[in-house]
Image: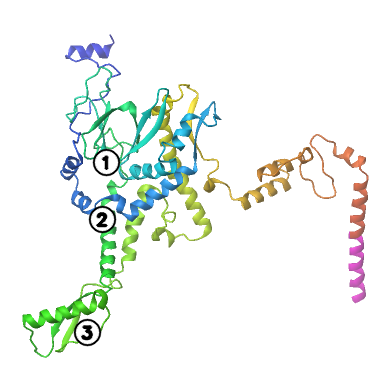
């Protein structure tokens, strides 16, 4: 017993075993989706905005982010490597490419992207065969909750000495049926960070953007309502010259106005029986310029997600960078700073949660192969220029330059570039010996020098004649 252990025993305490995890309690369990939101409303200032905003998958800013990563994730092919060598047609990579008979990886990549950004949690159910996992099934994030022993949820977690006190099961709330508890080993759970409200789950990227999403949504509704009304603002009718209207006349005029300005009769002329002043009530789209206002939510979404605004085709990004070079840089930035880290996080979870079901080798590793991703490939014009400059500058051999641009090489290409007239000197060869062995090179040099002398004589002769 060490000194610290003795000190703890003197005050009536004892050191817990290192294997004991921290106690996260059970007050973060939510029996259903409604109870979750009632808990959220008790502590977050954006609760009413969130409820009014509705489902985030109906918001255009959110879906721009979801579509961006979801469409690009399948560009990198799933692969398993053993000792850094790719294993062709490994069973795990085949299951990722074709999770089940109804879906391919491109389908599930979009579903994964949606759950990743909106909820921070992606769930796949493992359907096992005798040997390994045969199929993967995506589970909507709002139907799945983490469970652990004595968490107070219903149904209760079965007691077992093998239960992990932090997370032992996942509850799948089957729509219209009783919930189902799956052991944690039967669920592939991909998390985006750690949620402070529930450390067993991931973190939504759009939780801090509720106010911006709400504002953009209301501006979109305002525009839609204006267009629905054919761009006509609410009119206010006032009789002229001390005229008066009784209720019957006002109702008749209202009916006539509605008939002539809406539906199939929209645009028909309206004739009033008494002189009226007509004033509009509210602001027109021209008077209330929403384009500048809508750029603020766009910039916040781009900042929080890390995806360049121009790549998402947001107006705030297109106005500030429209050249081909800036567009190319934005595409590369988005892929390198967002998509690749997503792929790395997904691959790491697969390595720990799914790969052992297929391969117990410690040298096996699942990755996403990005070598053929178009946006990460070097521009071919720039590559050709770099290869040419390197060869002409004597930095690389002709064969190396040809390999850079994807050309085949021969043994004759194992040479450095030499200026014209001095001959091509191979590596390890004596320059003088090469020149003596080929006296024709000296004849070429003599002809070249004689030509220069003749040009100089002609030039000076013409000058003297003019003088």
Q: Is residue 38 above or below residue 279?
A: above
Residue at mark 2 to residue at mark 1: CA–CA distance: 21 Å
Q: Circle 3 — which element?
A: loop
> Which one is in front, 25 or 272?
272
| Mark 3: few/some/many CA within 10 Å (<14, 14-19, 20+) | few
- Residue 213 coordinates in the image, percent (x, y): 28, 54
Where does label 3 land, which residue?
270
* In this rendering, position of residue 422 left or right of residue 74: right
Is residue 118 visible to us here?
yes
Where does label 2 land, which residue?
214
Furthest-front residue in view?
A: 101
Q: Is residue 278 above or below residue 444?
A: below
Residue at mark 3 to residue at mark 2: CA–CA distance: 39 Å
Q: Earlier in the sequence, mark 1 or mark 3?
A: 1
Is residue 467 visible to us here?
no
Disc 3 versus disc 2: nearer the observer:
3
Residue at mark 1 to residue at mark 3: CA–CA distance: 53 Å
Q: Circle 1 — which element?
A: helix
Disc 2 versus disc 1: nearer the observer:
1
| Mark 1: few/some/many CA within 10 Å (<14, 14-19, 20+) | some
Where does label 1 land, which residue?
142
> Which one is in front, 123 or 69?
123
> Is residue 382 shown in magenta?
no
- Residue 109 coordinates in the image, percent (x, y): 41, 42
Disc 1 versus disc 3: nearer the observer:
3
Q: Residue at the spot x=27%, y=16% of the render?
A: 17
Q: Is residue 257 above or below residue 356?
A: below
| Mark 2: few/some/many CA within 10 Å (<14, 14-19, 20+) | some
Query: Magenta segment, which residues?
Result: 452-467
> Which one is in front, 463 or 290?
290
Location of residue 339 by image quarter: top left
Q: Circle 2 — which element?
A: helix
């Amino acid at each position: 017993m060490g000194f610290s252990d003795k000190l703890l025993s003197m005050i009536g305490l004892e050191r817990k075993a290192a294997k004991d995890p921290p106690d996260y309690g059970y007050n973060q369990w939510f029996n259903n989706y409604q109870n979750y939101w009632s808990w959220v409303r008790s502590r977050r200032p954006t609760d009413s905005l969130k409820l009014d905003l509705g489902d985030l998958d109906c918001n255009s800013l959110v879906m721009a982010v979801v579509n961006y990563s979801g469409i690009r994730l399948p560009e990198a092919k799933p692969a398993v490597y053993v000792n850094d060598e790719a294993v062709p047609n490994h069973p795990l990579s085949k299951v990722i490419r074709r999770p089940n008979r109804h879906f391919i990886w491109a389908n599930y990549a979009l579903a994964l992207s949606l759950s990743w950004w909106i909820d921070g949690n992606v769930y796949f159910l493992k359907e096992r065969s005798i040997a390994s996992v045969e199929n993967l099934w995506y589970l909507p994030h709002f139907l799945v909750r983490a469970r652990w022993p004595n968490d107070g949820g219903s149904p209760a977690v079965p007691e077992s000495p093998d239960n992990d006190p932090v997370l032992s099961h996942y509850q799948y709330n089957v729509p219209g049926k009783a919930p189902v508890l799956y052991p944690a080993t039967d669920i592939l759970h991909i998390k985006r960070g750690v949620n402070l409200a529930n450390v067993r789950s991931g973190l939504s990227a759009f939780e801090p953007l509720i106010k911006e999403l709400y504002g953009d949504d209301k501006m979109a509704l305002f525009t839609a309502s204006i267009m629905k009304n054919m761009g006509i603002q609410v009119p206010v009718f006032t009789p002229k010259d001390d005229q008066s209207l009784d209720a019957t006349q006002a109702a008749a005029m209202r009916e006539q106005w509605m008939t002539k300005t809406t539906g199939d009769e929209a645009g028909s002329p309206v004739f009033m029986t008494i002189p009226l002043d007509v004033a509009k009530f509210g602001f027109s789209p021209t008077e209330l310029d929403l384009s500048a206002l809508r750029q603020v939510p766009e910039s916040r979404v781009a900042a929080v997600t890390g995806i360049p605004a121009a790549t998402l085709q947001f107006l705030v990004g297109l106005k500030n960078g429209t050249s081909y070079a800036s567009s190319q840089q934005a595409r590369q930035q988005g892929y390198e700073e967002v998509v690749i880290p997503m792929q790395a996080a997904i691959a790491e979870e697969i390595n720990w949660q799914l790969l052992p079901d297929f391969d117990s080798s410690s040298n096996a590793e699942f990755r996403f192969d990005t070598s053929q991703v178009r946006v990460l490939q070097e521009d071919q014009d720039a590559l050709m220029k770099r290869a040419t400059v390197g060869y002409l500058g004597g930095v690389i051999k002709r064969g190396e330059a040809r390999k850079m641009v994807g050309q085949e090489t021969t043994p004759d290409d194992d040479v450095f570039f030499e200026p014209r007239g001095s001959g091509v000197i191979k590596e390890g060869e004596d320059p003088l010996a090469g020149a003596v062995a080929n006296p024709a090179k000296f004849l070429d040099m003599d002809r070249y020098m004689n030509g220069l002398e003749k040009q100089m004589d002609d030039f000076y002769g013409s000058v003297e004649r003019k003088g």
